[in-house]
Image (tube, rainbow, N blue to C red):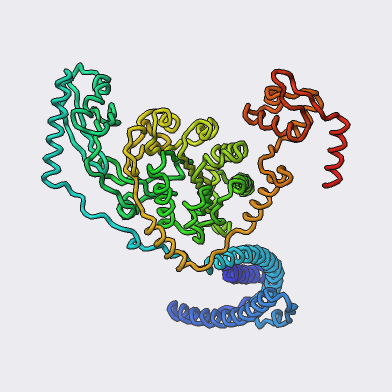
Amino acid sequence: YDLGVKAYNTTEKMKNNRKQRIVEKERKGLPIKKKKESSFINIVEDDNEEIERKKEKSSRQFFGNLDKKIKVLDFIKNASEEDDVETEVTNDVTENNYSEDMIQEPIIQEPVQSRTTFERQTEQQTNSRKKSKLDNDVKEVVNKEIEEQILENKKEKEYVHPSIDLLKSNSSTRLNSSDKKELLENADKLTEILANFGVDAKVTQVTKGPSVTRFELQPSPGVKVSKIVNLSDDIALGLAASGIRIEAPIPGKAAVGIEVPNSKQTAVFLREVLESDEFIESKKKLAFALGKDISGKCVVGDLSKMPHTLIAGATGSGKSVCINSLIISLLYKYNPDEVKLLMVDPKVVELNVYNGIPHLLIPVVTDPKKAAAALNWAVNEMTNRYKLFADMGVRNMESYNELFNKGMISEKLPYIVIIVDELADLMMVCPNDVEDYIGRLAQMARAAGMHLVIATQRPSVDVITGVIKANIPSRISFAVSSQIDSRTILDSSGAEKLLGKGDMLYYPVGESKPLRVQGCFISEEEVENVISFIKSEQGDINYEEDIIEHINNTADNNGGHSSEGNDDIDERLDEAIKIVVEYNQASTSFLQRKLRIGFNRAARIMDQLEERKIISEKDGSKPRQVLMTKAQLYESNNEKDENV
């Protein structure tokens, strides 16, 4: 386009110069060549032919020189891109064969100026290309490093999900005619019992679940719901039931629910829930199979929303089966790079079967002291994750993992599910540490993608302390022995009326009332089959050695307080000795105040002080004498420092 504009301007200049020369000759009186006179048509034809010839000649000369200039410019461009060729422009550009009527000077100078401008533009373009190329190279290097790390991660053996055929299926559980007849008879009987006590109500719906049948009553206007609730024992007697549970009212319905145990309890197999649409099509981030409700609908929980769960119930009520169902659900649905498990099993035998699966961070922890160290590692991991989120400018794990899709990080962070099978045993060994670690995790670990599942068979206040209970909002209660235990778990009664064998009250965060669910059943044989399949497909598993080392070091350091190999020595004994000697006073209540500990622990410390001859023996109501002086305490401390 630029060359065309220059050619047009040159032609216009030549025309103007020709006209100026003719005007000057006329002004000076110089003769002007006149064309031969002829007819108008001939003149026009001759003129046109001559003009066409001149145009062809001038254009041929002009474009011939133009081709030379374009070649020179192309040569300059190629030389500037290679950065090694020095541009040498020959004088061929100035050798023009223009006619006398054409002005040569502008034609010669314009290409030289355009060449200089072009060189400058070419240099700028080359520099910008170099800079952009350098930036692209840096980006490519970073992206290649991330891609290489992703490929290395993918080179690891892919996880093969276990087959659903490894689990047992349930036969058809449709109602037959005799069952329907029995339900109708019980409905009529229930209406009659209420009428005998002056309660006017009618049964509107009967729903038979796996373990209980619910009769929905609609009381007449003016009938108090509390009157029906107070008749629970009389209704159980009239229906010949072992015990009933009254839900007044049913959430979302204008009816009162009376739950009567079935004469024959139907098991809900884990396979039924895993094959259900609720589980397969679930968009929950940490979905696990729970069981079926009274209406037969599959119930699927979400650990990421709960976000921590407390499972409690008496021995044989179904806690361990519930934990197995939860773990197997995660193994069926998620890969090892999506979910990692940290298991603590003080009972040793319950979770030991899961050793060797790729989802485990470390082998199942069975030592209570190492269990406290494992929880300590979890607290440190939570802190490190929050620092990582702060560096990347994100708020939670979901936002951080989205950076993987953008190619900004090499791998995603997995969810970590911490499962503690028996909390009571840990609280007996190291209550302070366990309570502190669980409290911190329960308060802060949700956004870091870490979730607690804690089970206990002794739901007393010394096990489920106020700190633990306040920070674990979701509860699952199986059958318990008393109403007090039910209130400890659920803050309401009802769990004492459960039937056992997986019958539970599921109380997730956000719900107004607990939901009665028949839990999934999975046998030990099925668990072993699934684990054996995963181990055979996955091969050898490499545990996280740094976690194991951290746990061992922490456990050794905490165990260092017990000297001479005696595990019964209190870790605050040295502090108690210092206080007793400095104040020259020793009593259980005195140690309670100074150390801020309970009576039992203070009494044990007093016994240990007596064994070491630091205080005198008990002599009735007389105060104990302190036998160690400050000088002796100073010498013993120096000896300890020298030994260290």
**Where's residue 624, x and y in %?**
75, 23
**Residue under the image location 66 percent in, 32 percent down:** 604
**Residue under the image location 83 percent in, 30 percent down:** 628
| Extreme residue toward the top, this view | 222
Query: Is 511 on the left-hand or right-hand side of 144?
Result: left
**Where's residue 574, x and y in %?**
76, 35
Query: Is 586 on the left-hand or right-hand side of 364?
Result: right
- Name above or below for residue 220 compared with residue 409: above
Residue 363 visible, this angle: yes
Q: Quadrant of residue 238?
A: top left
**Where's residue 114, x and y in %?**
68, 69
The number of callouts visible is 0
Q: Nearer the viewer, residue 55 or 408?
A: 408
Q: Which quadrant holds the N terminus?
A: bottom right
Residue 26 visible, this angle: no
Q: Nearer the viewer, residue 183 or 263?
A: 263
Q: Quadrant of residue 578?
A: top right
Q: Nearer the viewer, residue 160 or 368?
A: 368
Query: Is 12 on the left-hand or right-hand side of 223?
Result: right
Q: Nearer the viewer, residue 226 or 17?
A: 226
- Name above or below for residue 3 compared with residue 565: below
- Name above or below for residue 188 compared with residue 27: above
**Where's residue 391, x and y in %?**
64, 48
| Extreme residue toward the front, this view | 619
